[in-house]
């Protein structure tokens, strides 16, 4: 089993020093930079817009994995892509038309992801399976960092893994929310190939990031 991609969520970083934080996780061995975009409407919090993403772009060559908790989302896709998003992941509930949104993301030249909230059934993937490059399983309800991992989502990771394997689908299977050294292995065993982690990467300050990332990779 190969080591999972580690995608630090910069929501847990020092926002006053965001550029340096992105450089630090890059040097520490991160694979993607996970950027949580919250609109204060789809989720009860407001975070980052395209201007911030654009300002961060020169600080790393790592892919920007932009998690859009925005409803409706379509009118923002172009701006995030122009700002440097490589992956854009959307929630089916954010609407209005998931299939159209995914097509638009790919049309813009980015990779398209679908995000499943803890209560969202895996069947939502069935009719868009050819339009996705990434599936993100939320192991917390979206809106905040630092929440506790919802164990039932391990079964959902397994269910999505089976669906992808059945058709040899190459999508990244990512988990987000409350991922830490205690549950990272279980996520990978269930079939995850990428782990998002905020708190577990950024704890202890920059000198700890490399060890934190290694631990999550299981190295
Ligand atoms: C929650 C976000 C997550 C979160 C992860 O809505 O999508 O990316 O910030 O943070 P931790 O790892 O602290 O749960
Ligand atoms: Zn996220």
Image: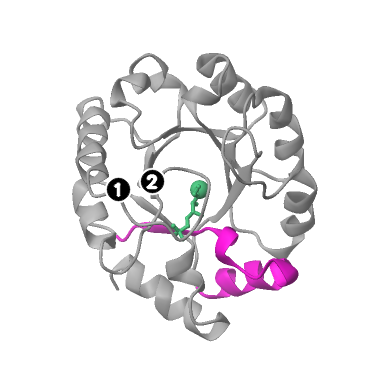
- Which label was assigned to residue 192? 1
Q: Nearer the viewer, residue 21 or 106?
A: 21
Q: From the Cβ of disc 2, is ligand 2 less than 8 Å away?
A: no
Name which of mark 1 and mark 2 comes first in the sequence: 2
Residue 55's x, y, as percent?
A: 79, 56
Q: What residue occupies the far front of the structure in this picture?
A: 44
Task: Sort mark 2 into few (<14), some (14-19) or many (20+) by Cα contacts within 10 Å.
Answer: many
Q: Are marks 1 and 2 in contact (CB under 8 Å)?
A: yes
In the rendered view, would you say 204 is above or below 126? below
Q: On the rendered image, what quadrant is the N terminus found in?
A: bottom left
Q: Could you say whether the residue bearing mark 2 is in a helix, strand or loop?
A: strand
* Residue 135 on the magenta segment: no
Give the label on residue 18, or none: none
| Place of residue 56 in the rendered image (x, y in percent of width and height, measured from the top left) | 73, 58
Q: Which residue occupies 58% across, 59% down? A: 11
Q: Nearer the viewer, residue 63 or 21?
A: 21
Q: Which mark is residue 174?
A: 2
Span colored in magenta: 3-28
Picture quadrant where residue 133 is located: top left
Quadrant assignment, res 217: bottom left
* Residue at 52% across, 52% down: 144
Q: Which quadrant of the view contains residue 188?
A: bottom left
Magenta portion: prevailing SS class? helix
């Amino acid at each position: 089993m190969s080591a999972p991609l580690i995608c630090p969520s910069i929501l847990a970083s020092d926002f006053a020093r965001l550029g340096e934080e992105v450089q630090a996780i890059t040097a520490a061995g991160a694979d993607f930079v996970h950027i949580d975009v919250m609109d204060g409407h789809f989720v009860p919090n407001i975070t980052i817009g395209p201007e911030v993403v654009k300002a961060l772009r020169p600080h790393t060559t790592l892919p920007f994995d932009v998690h859009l908790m925005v409803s409706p989302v379509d009118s923002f896709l172009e701006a995030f892509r122009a700002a440097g998003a490589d992956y854009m992941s959307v929630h089916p509930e954010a609407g209005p038309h998931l299939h159209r949104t995914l097509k638009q993301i790919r049309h813009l030249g980015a990779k398209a992801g679908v995000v499943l909230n803890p209560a969202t059934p895996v069947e939502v993937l069935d009719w868009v399976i050819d339009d996705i490059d990434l599936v993100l399983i939320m192991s917390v309800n979206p809106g905040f960092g630092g929440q506790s991992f919802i164990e039932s989502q391990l079964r959902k990771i397994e269910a999505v893994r089976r669906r992808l394997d059945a058709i040899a689908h190459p999508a990244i299977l990512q988990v987000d929310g409350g991922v830490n050294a205690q549950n990272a292995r279980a996520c990978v065993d269930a079939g995850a190939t990428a782990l998002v982690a905020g708190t577990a990467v950024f704890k202890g300050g920059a000198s700890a990031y490399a060890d934190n990332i290694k631990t999550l990779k299981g190295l």
